[in-house]
Amino acid sequence: MLCQTKEYLESLNPGETKFLEKYMIGWQKVHTWEPSSFLKQVKDDRLLLTVNPRLTNCPSEYKDDLVFAKRFWEHDINLAYTWNSIKEEFSTARHLYYQSFSQDKELIEVSEITEYIDTLDSANFGLRSGFLKTSLRLAVDLLDKFAGFFNLYLELGNDPTKVMWSNVWYEKLKYKKSFDNSLNPIIFEKLEYNPYLKALVNLRKNLYDKKYEDFYPFKILRDYITHQGIILHNNKVIDESKENYNLEQMQQETYFLLRMVKAAIIYLVGVVMIEEEEKEKRLII
């Protein structure tokens, strides 16, 4: 087919072939393109911010292309800024996660510039462990950006300097005896019809309430990494009474958290989608 096309192009005048040549070059690039090993890994790990379940070998599909259907942010540009920051911090946390696996010679050389005390217990200090700890901390911290987004978008009226993922759900940001009793009336009303908001409320419980023991450690890990410091080891951890992990364990924990945060970002888009539909219904009525 390409040979026949070439013969056809040669039969045309130079001026007539310019557009067709440009088209064919673009066509060939798309249909001969192969994703890099890194992009394949991100796809296989399902860490692209996309809802496309089946990616083909097309460069335009290997994108964090999760977007909103409507330009609802036009009345407040801060909503766009916050959304972009959420995506930026997720992509940064993802990049740092993958860097923790890197065996790149230049990275190893840069990491070896810094000397550490040898604690004689296989403790791992360096760029790879630092990337991993920072990835987990950043993934947890970016959830606070959700709080800022909801405070603006849902018009909760809270002081933007005080809202956090842990308290944005509460009326006046205050906890009263139980989570359900503390819910902001605006959020409580929307839970009746917005399943994505309900999913985020459940995620908040999973990450912060002690009764959800399988998830609560992420908040603890973030606090230890930030304030005390988590110690990563190359080998199996001997002293499990302390906040010690081996590198592989922490990579698994971080990956699971990144998948959870990706789901949260998709839910956020869903919240906006449902809310915009509700606004249109009210306009019709």
Image (cartoon, grey):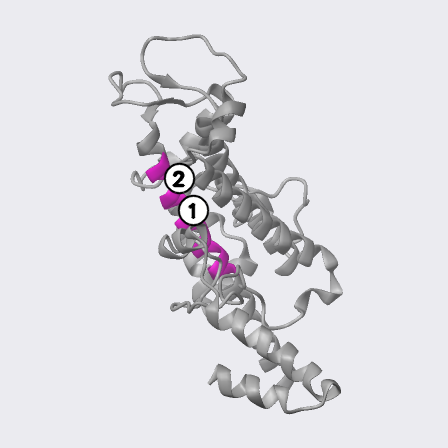
User: What's under tag 1, amino acid-wise?
Assistant: Leu
Q: Residue at x 41, y 40 (%)?
A: 208
Asked if residue 278 can be seen in this view, the reply is: no
**Residue 28 coordinates in the image, percent (x, y):** 53, 73
> Which of the numbered marks, if any, corresponds to residue 254?
2
**Which residue in the protein does label 1 denote?**
258
For residue 217, above or below residue 182: above
* Drawn side of residue 171 relative to residue 259, left or right: right
Q: Does residue 107 show up?
A: yes
Q: Main secondary structure of the magenta part?
A: helix
Mark 2 lies on a secondary structure that is helix
Q: Residue at x 67, y 91 (%)?
A: 12
Bounds of the magenta span? 251-268
Using residue 208 as the reference point, say whether residue 161 is left or right of it: right
Magenta stretch holds residue 264: yes
How far, Cα to Cα, is label 2 from label 1?
6 Å
Which numbered marker is on residue 208? none
Image location of residue 247, percent across then percent down:
35, 29
Residue type, mark 2 in image: Thr
Q: Is residue 35 magenta?
A: no
